Image (cartoon, rainbow, N blue to C red):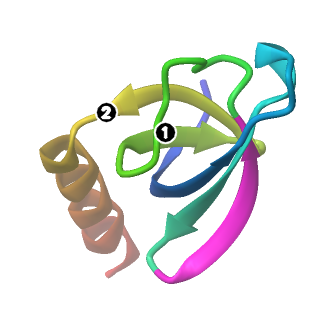
Amino acid sequence: MCLAIPGLIVEVEENGDPLLRTARVDFSGVVKNVSLACTPQARPGQYVLVHAGIALETIDEEEARRTLELFEELGE
C-alpha cells in the first residue's frame, strides 16, 4: 500500500518520449517536478495522485479536495 498525494499540474515538459514527460505539480503551494510516465494523458490544469515523484493517475478536482480534507482530519 502506498500514500499518494493529490496535486495540480501547472506545467508539462515534453521531452520527445512519453516515458520522459515531466510536470511541475503544485501541492498546496509547494511545487515539485513529477514524472508523468504512468499518466501520459495528463495535462496542465488536471489533478494527479503522486507517490515517490511519479503521477499514478489523474483525478477530478472534487476527489482531490476530498482527499486533502481527509489528510487534514488525520493530522488533527
Q: Which residue is mark 2?
A: 59
* Mark 1: few/some/many CA within 10 Å (<14, 14-19, 20+): many
Residue at 44% over, 76% down? 28
First reached walking from the N terminus: tag 1 or tag 2 = 1
The front one of 18 and 34 is 18
Q: Which residue is mark 1?
A: 49
Which image quarter holds the N terminus? Answer: top right
Q: Is residue 75 left or right of residue 41?
A: left
Quadrant of residue 37 within the rendered picture: top right
For the residues bearing labels 1 and 2, Cβ distance under 8 angstroms: yes
| Residue 44 position within the rendered picture, expressed as x and y whole percent measured from the top left | 45, 48
| Residue 61 position within the rendered picture, expressed as x and y whole percent measured from the top left | 20, 48
The disc label shown at residue 3, or none: none
Give me the C-alpha separation between circle 1 and circle 2. Answer: 7 Å
Magenta residues? 29-35
- Does residue 43 sit above or below 27 in this rendering? above
Residue at 66% over, 17% down? 38
In the rendered image, residue 9 lying in the magenta stretch gets the answer no
Residue type of the residue flagged with mark 1: Leu
